[in-house]
Image (cartoon, helix red, strand yellow):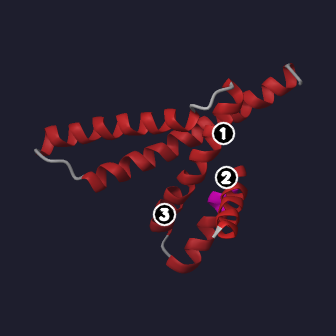
């Protein structure tokens, strides 16, 4: 069982190192089976978000010398879930939790992609100006 966990964590680490390359690889893999660009792109966004979550939280932790990165991202996602769910309840009288979760997850993809680029550039700048 531990070897299976080690293989899974190694695969996750490999995919999380470069999430944009992972996005492209999964897009072509999913398109090979689905043959529909819109559905392929959405599914690939959903899968890549998992890898962006780990990558961005690690970069956050390394840049700011903390261990709170993952939990901070989760907190932001839960706040977004509550706000979007509350807004949907206000408009329609009830919230469709699956749709709210899908919206939050895809917004997380967009936000984490932007944050990945910003943190990546900050790391490059930090290592250039303050080599350790």
Spatial CA span between label 1 and label 2: 10 Å
Would you name the residue on which mark 3 appears?
43
Q: Nearer the viewer, residue 63 or 10?
A: 10
| 21 within the magenta span | yes
Q: Nearer the viewer, residue 29 or 69?
A: 69
Taking the image as drawn, is residue 22 in sight?
yes
Q: Nearer the viewer, mark 2 or mark 3?
A: 2
Provide residue 116's location: percent of width, then percent of height.
63, 39
**Rendered image: mark on residue 58:** 1
Spatial CA span between label 2 and label 3: 17 Å
| 126 within the magenta span | no
Taking the image as drawn, is residue 118 in sight?
no
Q: Quadrant of residue 93?
A: top left
Do residues under tags 3 and 1 come within 8 Å of each other at their CB atoms?
no
Would you name the residue on which mark 2 appears?
16
- Is residue 32 shown above or below 96? below
Report whether 84 appears left or right of 128: left
Query: Over which residues does the magenta segment extend?
Result: 20-24
Q: Residue furthest front?
A: 1
Q: Quadrant of residue 131?
A: top right
Q: Residue at x 53, y 59 (%)?
A: 47
Provide residue 105's location: percent of width, then percent of height.
43, 49
Q: Nearer the viewer, mark 3 or mark 1?
A: 1
């Amino acid at each position: 069982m531990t070897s299976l966990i080690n293989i899974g964590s190694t695969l996750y680490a490999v995919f999380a190192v470069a999430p944009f390359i992972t996005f492209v690889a999964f897009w072509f893999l999913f398109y090979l089976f689905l043959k529909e660009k819109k559905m392929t792109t959405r599914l690939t966004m959903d899968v890549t978000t998992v890898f962006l979550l780990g990558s961005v939280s690690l970069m956050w932790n390394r840049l700011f010398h903390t261990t709170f990165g993952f939990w901070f991202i989760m907190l932001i996602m839960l706040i977004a879930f509550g706000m979007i769910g509350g807004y949907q309840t206000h408009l329609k009288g009830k919230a469709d939790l699956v749709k709210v979760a899908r919206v939050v997850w895809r917004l997380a993809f967009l936000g984490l992609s932007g944050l990945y680029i910003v943190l990546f550039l900050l790391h490059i700048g930090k290592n250039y100006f303050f080599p350790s």
